[in-house]
Amino acid sequence: MTSFPLSRRALFGTAAAGALAAPFVMTSSALAQSEPKAESMKSPAGRTNSFKIGSFGVTVISDGIRIAEKPEETFGTNQPAEAVADLLKANFLPADRFVNGFSPTLIDTGSDLVLFDTGMGEAGRQAGAGHLLEGIAAAGYTPDQVSVVVLTHMHGDHINGLMEAGAPAFKNARYVAGQVEYDFWKDEARVGTPAEGGHKGVLRNVVPLADKMTFIGDGSEVVPGIAGMAAFGHSPGHMVFKVESEGKGLVLTADTANHFVLSLQRPDWEVKFDMDKAKAAVARKTVFDMIATDRLPFVGYHMPFPAVGFIEKHEQGYRFVPETYQFEI
């Protein structure tokens, strides 16, 4: 694959190099996000939101949502619980519960149908998630039409939908993933560590597809108009993707920020699911500084559905501005 020229790409070089040099501190709780509880999830039945970026058709699909308690145990874990509650209340949100959504994205370039992440899959259906395939159908496509599947990283809520009934869910697709991410999770050194569950998930869902997979690094092109950018920290090789068509742009930020208030207004606050919390904070500020400066729309995997919006710098962080009619006129 060729290198794709990106503005501000140099920003990611520093963050990526630092992430590679630093050890990842993991706990079992940081890897538990791939194990949804049935009583804590509700089904949005594959809702979709479609819009255009230049000539590209973009469809965001809701794979499901999870309602969880005690936000302070997930976000701002290095802050007093009262500070987390106060910030939620200031933003008209309850202080004792929060909603976490899961939103894969489908991009029709005219030449390729590119899927970014695969949701909870069969593992999430008992808990009310795993609606990606319904969403693809609602958008007017079939799984067999997907020509490229891109994995932003390899946590369970992004890779569990790769397989369906023991076979590839997207049988005609080729696959793209970060080399650093794959090498970390495939390594048998994960056995006996808190990362063992993730390792097993990759062996089950990703390794069987490795012969059809292209492994990329910072700046690599996926298809013309779409390229990867290193944003390590949430996971060892976490990547975001920049989309450009006819002078219009979009950034798929994956799990760079996992809450539209707690992660964005306070980007330095630690998040339980971030494997290297310091590097994740650097990635948040790098990615969202770029998005705010360039006034680009973005899709955040865990943003409130339809998971699309804009960012402006605000105080020590950022303010999320949900998309309304910007793509309709």
Image (cartoon, rainbow, N blue to C red):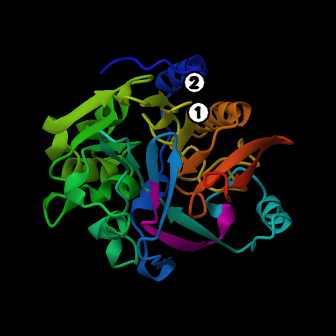
Q: SS for tag 1? A: helix
**Residue ID for mark 2:** 15
Crowding around mark 2 (Cα neighbors within 10 Å: few <14, some 14 to 19, many 20+) is some
Q: Nearer the viewer, residue 213 or 114?
A: 114
Q: Work out whether 133 lies above or below 194.
A: below
Q: Which residues are magenta?
A: 59-72
Residue 64 falls within the magenta-colored stretch:
yes
Crowding around mark 1 (Cα neighbors within 10 Å: few <14, some 14 to 19, many 20+) is many
Q: Measuring from the top left, give residue 229's x and y in whole percent.
A: 48, 29
Residue 116 falls within the magenta-colored stretch:
no
Q: Compare marks 2 and 1 and give the one earlier in the sequence.
A: 2
Residue at mark 2 to residue at mark 1: CA–CA distance: 7 Å
Q: Amino acid at mark 2?
A: Ala
Q: Is residue 68 left or right of residue 37?
A: right
Q: Measuring from the top left, give residue 105's x and y in whole percent.
A: 43, 52
Residue drawn at 54 percent across, 43 percent down: 253
Q: Residue furthest front?
A: 329
Q: Measuring from the top left, give residue 109's x and y in whole percent.
A: 37, 41
Q: Is residue 135 left or right of residue 241?
A: left
Magenta residues, dominant SS class: strand
